Amino acid sequence: MSQDTTGSPAPAAATSAGHDQAPHVEALENLLHEDRKFAPSQEFAANAVATAADYTEAAADRPAFWARQARELLTWDKDFTDALDWSNPPFAKWFVGGEINAAYNALDRHVENGLGDRVAIYFEGEPGDTRSYTYAQLTEEVKKAANAFEALGVAKGDRVAVYLPMIPEAVITILACARIGAVHSVVFGGFSADALRSRIDDAEAKLVVTADGTYRRGKPSPLKPAVDEALSKEGHTVENVVVVKRNGEAVNWVEGRDLWWDDTVEAASAEHTAVGHDSEHPLFILYTSGTTGKPKGILHTTGGYLTQGAYTHKAVFDLHPETDVYWCTADVGWITGHSYVAYAPLINGATQLMYEGTPDSPHQGRWWELIEKYKVSILYTAPTAIRTFMKWGREIPAKYDLSSIRVLGSVGEPINPEAWMWYREVIGGNGGAKENPAPIVDTWWQTETGAQMIAPLPGVTATKPGSAQVPLPGIAVDVVDDAGASVPNGEGGYLVIREPWPAMLRGIWGDPERFKDTYWSRFEAMYFAGDGAKKDEDGDVWLLGRVDDVMNVSGHRLSTTEIESALVSHPSVAEAAVVGAADETTGQAVVAFVILRGDAVNKGEETVLELRNHVGKEIGPIAKPKQLLIVPELPKTRSGKIVRRLLKDIAEGRESGDASTLADPSTMVQIAESLRK
Ligand code: PRX
């Protein structure tokens, strides 16, 4: 298997190593000349939730600022004594001694406060079926699920794997786990049986909650078979599988292990009293790709995570919960779906839309139709989606009334100025009809940070197309050079976080050393995010993409090493190297270079298909290389390291760069010739 050699990546987009990792290279270079600025309208600023005072307050005393948010936004069973304990870095404790129940905060207290009739979730299924849950109804469902899970022997601290589509039961399951103190581990439905099994094993999950399936582009798409396959081999810890009936397709059934949701949860009592858990009690594990082959179980705890989620959701989206309809399009299988679908909106008493399907089913105007129908006022989505809509054409959203939109959010990958402007005019400006288009908040954060870290405040910040701009109040972000020194304005470097923050990861499940090595060893006393960034002349931050072996495809994190491992596990593959190549729509696309074993027969397209499917089986369809090239050699240095930079040149259709450091400088010619055949 290969190793990366781009080694110490150059910070700024303008250098060649910066090119190696940054998607949208040309666009990023344009970024450096981008000088448009959009100040908030007077009307927006006058009614804004967050004000510039938040920055001053947080700058004066960061922990005190967060302590105020924790007490104002949440209801504690027992008040905390200290905001932060940082005596054993990098292991932080926030809101020390406090006790809190996440589900009570998301549900019961709103009902107790007279908001029981407010809609919590409008659900729209892909086939067009609809359901809605008021806060009172959702509270009841979560109480039933909590009772049902407890009756199955799930106790505080036990792990529950959740493998569900975007249906309300996903949120109900997550909150039921939180209520009883069980730790959920949601696995995205696009991951394969093998990926699901390795996550079940790593967390030693006792219960799996899944569905028969979902709908994708008008057709039923199964989920339960992957669970059956994952559990087909002995040696796992799972005692029960609870199955939601969603698409009604026939499923295999294991008596004694499998239970229908309708028979267990729906039949359970709706009486359940929530008790407070310690502020640092584990809330969930979420696996994400790192630079090594094995996904990391990112661990989040309760009090700090909820506080920063709730504050950012309110401040960055300018949430007015009594009137807004909020829609975050992320799947619950990703961190965005955890923080900004399952937790923060409900903690804040918001009304949100949840949509099960794809944006082009049954037609390419589905999202805009939903926005018109539900009068969505806050939309939070990813640049890949925006670029896809741009490709489909502005005449599609133009058919719908988007005048309800007040705030637009972007997350998951750098947004190029062109997509930003399109988002502003076509969606936020209702096709040009609005005098003051909705402000765009480009939010930078990660699975590890738990909540948004860098983003404009919509009533305060004059926004710049393509930049996440300013650290949020109470967040200490910096851009540093190789030696860890802060770079001056106008220069690039590595993005770091200098002070602990409430929603920070508390570790990697079962591997404290890896937590220290991965995030805290590159620079002394700073969290290394893995992203390149630049400060502009005003000191605003522009994100330039990953500087490590992590790819970002449609806002989904994938590891080059993990895909390489999957490829070399195929009997025909001798060696593999994977790069993320710039892609107009998805930001980056997976391109794999493969050397076949001497005894393997190259059957051309058939072999390519087989290897792509093999990756799909090992990791999931999202990881399948877009392009897979069978080559006779890989470019290697004398010490045997693969030079990805040169492979990236091929993948992006460029003349390949300097090959003089290769052990065999003719390798690139050999590769080029083999690809011409
Ligand atoms: O490279 C950054 C990119 O996504 C990475 C985190 O991925 P993940 O943990 O899957 O979380 C995605 C959703 C929060 C980051 O290291 N990223 C995320 N948001 C942005 C971004 N890059 C540029 N601009 C953003 N707004």
Image: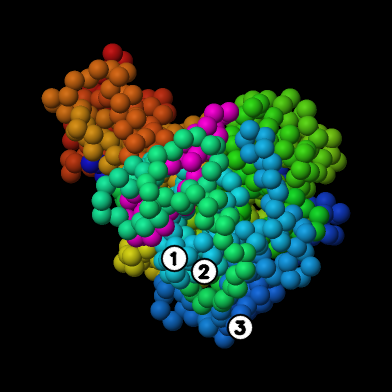
| Of the pair 395 and 283, the residue shown nearer to us | 283
| Of the pair 545 and 390, the residue shown nearer to us | 390
Task: Return the x and y of residue 502 as percentages of the image width and height.
Answer: 55, 70
Q: Quadrant of the N terminus?
A: top left
- How many discs appear? 3
- Three-letter code, disc 1: Val
Mark 3, residue position = 79
Residue at the image position 69 percent from the left and 58 percent from the top: 137
Q: CA distance from mark 3 to mark 1?
A: 27 Å
Q: Are marks 2 and 1 in contact (CB under 8 Å)?
A: yes
Task: Return the x and y of residue 59 as percentages of the image width and height.
Answer: 64, 73
Mark 1, residue position = 154
Question: Relative to residue 78, is residue 517 depicted above or below?
Answer: above
**Residue stretch in magenta:** 195-224
Q: Earlier in the sequence, mark 3 or mark 1?
A: 3
Nearest-to-viewer mark from 3 and 1: 1
Residue at the image position 30 percent from the left and 26 percent from the top: 610
Element marked by disc 2: helix
Q: Is residue 375 left or right of residue 654?
A: right
Mark 3, other Cα within 10 Å: few <14 / some 14–19 / many ≥20: some
Mark 2, residue position = 180
Task: Return the x and y of residue 657 as percentages of the image width and height.
Answer: 34, 31
The quarter of the displayed image where residue 74 is located: bottom right
Element marked by disc 1: loop
Q: Is mark 2 within 8 Å of ligand 1?
A: no
